Amino acid sequence: MKFSEQLWNRITPIYDAVLELPFIKELTDGSLPEEKFLFYMKQDTLYLADYSKALSLAGIRADSNDHTRAFLNFATNAISVERKLHGQFYEQFDSGVDIQKSPTCFSYTNFLLSTANMSDNAVSIAALLPCFWIYREAGLHIYENAVPDNPYQEWIDTYAGEDFNESVEKAIAITDEIAGEEPESRRREMMHAFVRSSQLEWMFWDSAYQMEEWAKQPKEAIPA
């Protein structure tokens, strides 16, 4: 069994839980309120800014030139998707990014960046994979079940498209290649990072539906 197959088997319950989230169900049937989708888009913009940095760091730290090129391309593509896809929805909703990271977005991006900076690069690459893989699988599920004239069809088409699929397959293949060169102890670290990011993926979708905010604190407790 490939290492990537072991990874997916481990997080199958998490992925199944993703598909049961109200955000996913309502996005699929087109009933997701615009304010929840827009909140998600803004958080995703903030997320992708840091995700692209973590991808770039993985590329810079890679031992293989092919891996370096792949991850730098991934980083560039993440920025391109944000500017094109998100920009269109912001124009449609006459909005922009006017909020800070939610607690979940903050936790997720800090986990990825700290892993990219402080852990072995193999572990960082495993931590980056769920965003690719779960999005691809969820995107295909939504695409196959979406109602006609879904108001979020452009988003659905992007993550179910062939260009994104090729990137996902490349990221999976690199993870398998790297895992094959690592000792069992490092593969356990990679597994742990992959599972943690998968849990944060679930939390990200859920927090968008909840339009999660930071707990309000007394003014005297907030640093100047």
Image: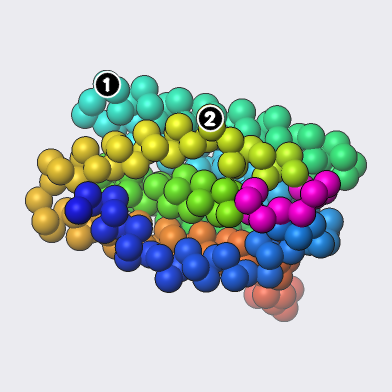
Q: Residue at x 42, y 58 (%)?
A: 197
In the rendered view, tell whether residue 194 sits above or below residue 56. below
- Which residue is under mark 2? 163
Q: Magenta segment: does it hold 151?
A: yes
**Colour convention:** rainbow
- Observer-nearest of 159 and 47: 159
Where residue 168 sits: x, y (%)? 43, 39
The image quadrant that residue 64 belongs to is top left
Q: Which residue ends up furthest to the bottom in the rendered image?
A: 218
Look at the numbered disc 1 and give the secondary structure of its residue. Answer: helix
Where residue 11 sits: x, y (%)? 38, 64
Where residue 105 sits: x, y (%)? 58, 58
Question: Earlier along the polypeptide chain: callout 2 or callout 1?
Answer: 1
Look at the numbered disc 2 and give the secondary structure of its residue. Answer: helix
- Which residue is under mark 1? 65
Q: Main secondary structure of the magenta part?
A: loop
Where residue 186 sits: x, y (%)? 17, 53
Q: Amino acid at mark 2?
A: Asp
* Side of 60 relative to 107 (left or right): left
The image quadrant that residue 100 belongs to is bottom right
The stretch in magenta equals: 142-152
- Observer-nearest of 162 and 78: 162
Q: Magenta segment: does it hold 88?
A: no
Q: Amino acid at mark 1?
A: Asn
Give the spatial CA distance, label 2 vs label 1.
Answer: 22 Å
Count of all numbered marks drawn on residues in the image: 2
Q: Residue at x 35, y 58 (%)?
A: 8
- Dot in front, 2 or 1: 2
